[in-house]
Image: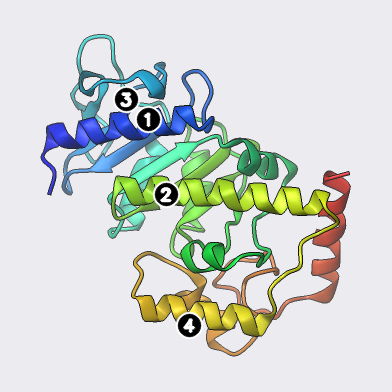
């Protein structure tokens, strides 16, 4: 287990990865790590995440109040969003918020990432819904994200970016990478005439594989009411994973039409 200083160094390394991969611009993005139930580390506001050193990192308590911060550094203005994740998902140890180009484009277009197009995305991510728009630094974003926390490990933020969370900082970052890769593949396949989606039976097999792997986190393979009841799974329906409704043909047609209109 890493000590506090090693965790700060890891946060700086993840900051460089996020910045170098173009997932943020200028001073955008923020991420945090849970040390224990009372102490958290977070990135500061107003600095480029690609050029941080350990002394940049701030320590806060469970209410977001500063416990330690070097002169000139303040915790991210969006720390409320992070703290909501930790309160409602005790299994989460790290949160990453970024603005990856393709995923954010889908968030701006209002299109969730729910189409089953590749095994890896289905197994590791499940669906990636869109949390309704909220003003940054207010309780609007935490409130919007809250309804999805028990069913997903990553969400798009409408007109804003993406959020991923997991049991380690590296895992949360990898989920963010996967969200962006998924979004890019979906976008580019649309440019080639549209993706060939995996069938419901193929998705079910992948859900079963995930369960066998014993992977951590929340995922439709474990908690999707539709999947448990033998109904259409969450992929492709664009609804919450706790919905007991079957997939509506008209809804699918509407989503497909919207996707095509947005990608013309």
Q: Residue at image x 25%, y 35%? A: 10
Q: Is residue 179 above or below residue 66?
A: below
Q: Within 10 Å of the Cα at label 1, are there few (<14), some (14-19), or many (20+) other Cα atoms?
A: many
Q: Which mark is residue 15?
A: 1
The quarter of the displayed image where residue 18 is located: top left
Q: Return the residue at label 3.
A: 75
Between marks 4 and 3, how big is the CA–CA gap? Answer: 41 Å
Q: Nearer the viewer, mark 4 or mark 3?
A: 4
Q: Is residue 116 above or below residue 176?
A: below
The quarter of the displayed image where residue 8 is located: top left
Give the x, y percent position of residue 162: 54, 43
Query: Along the polypeptide, which appears first: circle 3 or circle 2?
Result: 3
Query: Along the polypeptide, which appears first: circle 4 or circle 3?
Result: 3
Query: Along the polypeptide, which appears first: circle 1 or circle 3?
Result: 1
Between marks 1 and 2, how big is the CA–CA gap? Answer: 13 Å
Considering the numbered disc 4 on the image, is that residue within a helix, a strand or a loop?
Answer: helix
Q: Return the residue at label 2.
A: 174
Between marks 1 and 3, how big is the CA–CA gap? Answer: 15 Å
Q: Return the residue at label 4.
A: 208
Q: Residue at image x 54%, y 50%? A: 179
Give the x, y percent position of residue 65: 24, 30
Whether residue 137 appears in this view of the structure is: no
Q: Residue at image x 47%, y 63%? A: 124
Between marks 3 and 2, how big is the CA–CA gap? Answer: 23 Å
Between marks 2 and 4, how big is the CA–CA gap? Answer: 22 Å
């Amino acid at each position: 287990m890493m000590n506090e200083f090693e965790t700060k160094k890891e946060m700086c390394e993840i900051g460089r990865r996020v910045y170098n991969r173009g997932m943020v611009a200028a001073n955008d993005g923020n991420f945090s790590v849970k040390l224990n139930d009372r102490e958290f580390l977070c990135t500061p506001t107003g600095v480029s995440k690609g050029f941080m050193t350990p002394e940049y990192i701030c320590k806060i308590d469970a209410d977001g109040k500063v416990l330690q911060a070097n002169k000139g550094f303040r915790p991210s203005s969006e720390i409320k969003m992070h703290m909501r994740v930790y309160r409602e998902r005790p299994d989460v140890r790290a949160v990453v918020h970024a603005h990856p180009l393709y995923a954010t484009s889908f968030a701006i277009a209002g299109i969730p990432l729910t189409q089953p197009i590749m095994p890896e995305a289905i197994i590791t991510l499940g669906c990636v819904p869109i949390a309704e728009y909220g003003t940054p630094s207010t309780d609007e974003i935490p409130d919007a994200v809250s309804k999805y926390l028990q069913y997903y490990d990553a969400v798009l933020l409408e007109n804003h970016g993406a959020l991923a969370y997991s049991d380690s900082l590296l895992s949360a970052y990898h989920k963010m990478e996967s969200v962006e890769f998924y979004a890019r593949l979906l976008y580019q396949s649309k440019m080639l005439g549209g993706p060939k989606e995996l069938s419901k039976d193929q998705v079910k097999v992948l859900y079963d594989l995930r369960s066998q792997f014993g992977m951590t986190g929340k995922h439709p393979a474990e908690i999707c009411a539709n999947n448990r009841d033998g109904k259409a799974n969450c992929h492709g329906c664009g609804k919450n994973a706790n919905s007991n409704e079957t997939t509506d043909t008209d809804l699918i047609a509407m989503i497909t039409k919207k996707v095509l209109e947005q990608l013309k």
